[in-house]
Image: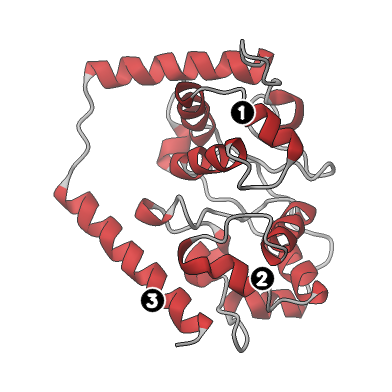
Amino acid sequence: MNIKSIASASCLLLLAVGVATAQSAAPVVSPTTVGSVAAQMALARQIVLHGSPQGAHACATCHGVEGQGQIKAAFPHLAGLPKPYLVRQLQHFDVLARDNPSMQAIAHKLTSDQIDALATYFSRQVPPPIMPPATPPPPLGTELALQGRDAVPACITCHGPGGRGLGGALSAAFPPIAGQPAVYIERQLRAWKQGQRPPGPDGLMGAIAKHLSAADIGAVSLYFAAQPTLVTASTTEAKP
């Protein structure tokens, strides 16, 4: 079985698990849950603005108060990203599984409760609007994103149409990537190619990145950077 087949099978299996889980357990919102979310939002906002008592830097310095990121500086937006994904990435930084000295130092100075609170906070923010590029993305990027090539599956197989994610059980492993800075996407693909970031389910991203040339990485990064973000109901809820 080649990488394209593995990627498709993995996504379909995880999606089926997510649908079954959602159907078997409808969420119950209680006053305690609501109060807990409000407390998490308050805790997270303190860390976002001022840093943590343990010495983690304020998130707003690089990612903005509402997680809008900084395109020119290649700091990714966190707003509207799935909570499970944000938790997993901070955990990876904490144990040095994902390479980024600045984020490793920050994550190491956060407790599990603070990580959970920050993930709740940023997942409930509205993603930034993406301005259409002056020139369309290169055809090579469009081809890789929508169709794939040889051993490289189409990116939308796991990241969803337009790179806006598939949600549910897939969100921790296959997040939305639409509208992220092109330089940031490039860096992540190079990190997977060089083994500096956990490769995900079945080692997919590591295996895929190894089949991408520098031109491939640049082109597909420009494609997804130009895609509009998706505003979901969870990101437009009133904030406490």
Residue 124 spot, x, y in % from top left: 48, 32
What is the CA distance from the residue labelled 3 to the residue labelled 1?
Answer: 35 Å
Compare residues 35 and 102 and report the one nearer the observer: 102
Q: Is residue 122 visible?
A: yes
Dot 3 amino acid type: Ala
State which quarter of the image contains the N terminus.
Answer: bottom left
N-terminal-most mark, 1 or 2: 1
Q: Which residue is drawn at 22% across and 52% down?
A: 21
Dot 2 amino acid type: Ala
Residue 22 spot, x, y in % from top left: 23, 50
Q: Which residue is drawn at 71% across and 69% down?
A: 220
Compare residues 174 and 160 and report the one nearer the observer: 174
Furthest-top residue in this view: 53
Per the rendering, the mark at residue 9 is: 3
N-terminal-most mark, 2 or 3: 3
Q: What element carries label 3?
A: helix
What is the CA distance from the residue labelled 1 to the residue labelled 2?
Answer: 28 Å
Dot 1 amino acid type: His
Per the rendering, the mark at residue 209 is: 2
Q: Which residue is denoted by mark 1 in the rendering?
A: 108
* Apparent side of residue 157 relative to residue 162 in the rendered image (left or right): left
